[in-house]
C-alpha cells in the first residue's frame, strides 16, 4: 500500500495522523486554509448570496424591495469574493465549486471601482 492510501484508510477509521509528506521542513509559508478547515464558509456564503441575488433580480418589476435585497446580496457576494481571492486554497475550492470566474470578476470589478473613486482610470 502507498503512504497516501494508508493515511486515507486511517482517516476513514477515525485515527488522528498527519498526511504523508507533511513532516517536511518548515519553509515559513503561511498555512493554507483548506475547505475542510472552514474555508468553505466563504464559498457557501458566496453561493447563498448568488442565489438570493438571482431570485431578487428576477422580481424587480413585481416587488419594490427586490432592488434593495439584490443590492445587499451583491454586496455580500463581493465581500465573500474578496475573502476567497485572498487565499490560494479558497480559490482552488472555488474552482472545484465552479464559481472561480465570478469570484475573479467581482474582485476585479471592485478594484476597478476603487481606482475610479481615487481618480485613477485603468485602461484595458
Image: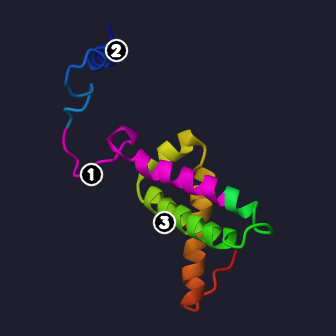
**Rendered image quadrant of residue 64:** bottom right
Q: Nearer the viewer, mark 2 or mark 3?
A: 3
Q: Which mark is residue 112?
A: none
**Residue under circle 2?**
5
Disc number lying in front (3 or 1): 3
Marks 1/2: CA distance? 26 Å
Q: Is residue 44 magenta?
A: yes
- Quadrant into which the C terminus falls: bottom right
Query: Residue 23 placed where, x, y %?
Result: 19, 32
State left or right for residue 97 relative to residue 4: right
- Residue at mark 3 to residue at mark 1: CA–CA distance: 25 Å
Instruction: Give the farthest residue toward the top.
Output: 1
Work out whether 110 lies above or below 37. Answer: below
Percent position (x, y) of residue 25?
19, 39
Q: Residues within 10 Å of mark 3 (few under 14, many from 20)?
A: some
Residue beneath label 1, please?
29
Residue shown at 23% from the left, 47% from the top: 27
Residue 40, percent across and down? 43, 45
Question: Which residue shows up at 48% across the image and 43% down it?
Answer: 93
Answer with mark 1 or mark 2, whichever residue precedes in sequence.
2
Q: Residues within 10 Å of mark 1 (few under 14, many from 20)?
A: few
Q: Secondary structure at mark 3?
A: helix
Q: Is residue 60 magenta-colored?
A: no
Query: Is tag 2's residue or tag 3's residue first in the polypeptide sequence?
Result: 2
Q: Quadrant of the N terminus?
A: top left
Residue extending farthest to the bottom is 119
Magenta part of the chain: 25-53
Q: Say above or below: 119 vs 28.
A: below
Q: Residue at x 20, y 25 (%)?
A: 17
Of residue 40 and residue 110, the one placed in the foreground of this image is 40
Judging by the rendered image, the residue that carries numbered circle 3 is: 79
Q: Residue at x 61, y 68 (%)?
A: 69
Amino acid at each position: 500500500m502507498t503512504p497516501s492510501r494508508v493515511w486515507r484508510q486511517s482517516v476513514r477509521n477515525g485515527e488522528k495522523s498527519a498526511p504523508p509528506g507533511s513532516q517536511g521542513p518548515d519553509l515559513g509559508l503561511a498555512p493554507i486554509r483548506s475547505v475542510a478547515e472552514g474555508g468553505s464558509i466563504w464559498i457557501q456564503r458566496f453561493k447563498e448570496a448568488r442565489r438570493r441575488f438571482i431570485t431578487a433580480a428576477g422580481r424587480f418589476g413585481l416587488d419594490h424591495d427586490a432592488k434593495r435585497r439584490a443590492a445587499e446580496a451583491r454586496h455580500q457576494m463581493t465581500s465573500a469574493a474578496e475573502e476567497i481571492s485572498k487565499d490560494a486554497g479558497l480559490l482552488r475550492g472555488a474552482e472545484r465549486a465552479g464559481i472561480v470566474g465570478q469570484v475573479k470578476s467581482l474582485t476585479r470589478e471592485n478594484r476597478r471601482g476603487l481606482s475610479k473613486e481615487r481618480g485613477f482610470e485603468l485602461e484595458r
